[in-house]
Image: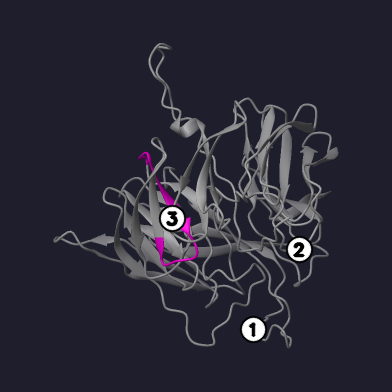
Amino acid sequence: MKNLFLLSGILFAIIISGCGNNHTKPVDKTWSYYYYADPDPAFNRVVVMDPRKMTMVGEVPVPGLSPHSADRAGYTNRMYIRTAGVQSFDVINATKMTYLKTVLLKHKPRAAGSYNKYRNLQLISGKDHPMVSIIDVSMDKVVGTVGPERQPGQEISGNCGGNATGHSNWLDKDHFTLLDRYNDNITVFKVVKNADGTYTFPVTQVLPVPTGVHTIDVDVQDRSLTKTQFFAAIEGSKPKSADKPEGKDVRPQIWELNYDGNGKLIVGKKAFFEGVGSDDKIHHYSISPDGKQIWQPICLSKELFVIDIATMKTVKTYPIGLGGGHVNFSKQLNLAIVTNHFDDAVTIIDMKTDKVWNVKITDAPEEDGLFIQSHLNYVSDDGKFFYIFATHDGVFVEINLEKKEVSRIYETAGTPEQSTS
């Protein structure tokens, strides 16, 4: 067994983008495979999984230390590998499963999945400094880096680990965010392309927040960028103490953020979680298939809160496992599936009857900070299967959602952890 910590990450899948109708033509399976970064120093690779055949079809060793996610570079067949141990990222060809090159950064990469199709720019936020680098996908070139350096002695008040930033996202085709976990704010930047082809990035807003924000969006990749409502997952901060002098005594909470279309976020209603104290934390939330609810797992309290978006009030709660961090949905079966990062079981919830099942996927012991289950896991197109990595064991797992049981497994060795960031 291998000890993994909260800075570890996990799983990525991009659903097939389309195939020709002529079944005699070769089919590009690139985007029907799942690509997982594996930071195990014995491998330091990206593994490529075929969920239909439940097998590993390839692997790509990368030179950068500690690969933690594999994000598609815009709409290309390249991927940006977030090598979290160095101030650079690696680029691979996903179709040929080969390493291409390394691109230098001014910071270690924290998240690399936020793409703007209108400008062909991709954001990579910082792990060691509260910065964001802006990448021109056509050339894999850094066209700018914004945000401050970490100051000597500066510490993070939030409870969700030591990453300098949360997940940066695009608000529209001209504006993006930096979720600064050192200075506890959300900074909004505007993209300005100059006549000589260079870029500048003026600040349009600095929004103070009580403590670190993990994310303000569910999907940062490939959307229309016309959304006007976001939600800030404010992770929580323990009270100040000898072992956490930067603590702020902030309970986990969600803020509604309304976007004015001109580079400014306006704070709306706020949601709190009854019985959840400032020693707990939240990670990612999900929006229900009908778009009317926020499903927010609480990491240590082993509880999931369902928030009505119209009122920002709790309408239901469910018991889950330790380290609840992500929720997926099977619309066909009307199920919610909860990834419990520090637990041995995946939680399945019937959204109509409220019945709850726990499907065990590993014998690893529960432990706060020990990543047992992968991030960002996926439901099959027909809604009948759920795919997840038992990261601690290096085992790819398929769960039959109709039977609520493990149906197939595949051992890869290593510790494949995270795909898209």
Which quarter of the picture shows residue 248? bottom right
Closer to viewer: mark 3 or mark 2? 2
Mark 3 or 1, nearer chain start: 3
Q: Secondary structure beneath disc 1?
A: loop
Where's the N terminus, which quadrant? bottom right
Is 267 located above or below residue 147 in the figure?
A: above
Of badges 2 and 1, the one in the foreground is 2
Q: Nearer the viewer, residue 312 or 406?
A: 406
Label of residue 368 in the image? 2
The residue at the point 38 percent across, 36 percent down is 96
Residue annotated with mark 3: 171
- Identify the disc placed on residue 421: none
> Against 328, is 402 above or below?
above
Residue 400 at least partly seen: no
**Structural distance between the alpha carbons of marks 3 and 2:** 33 Å
**Where does label 1 land, which residue?**
246
Q: Is residue 207 on the magenta stretch?
A: no
Disc 3 element: strand
Range drawn in magenta: 75-88
Badge nearest the viewer, 3 or 1: 1
Q: Quadrant of residue 263?
A: bottom left
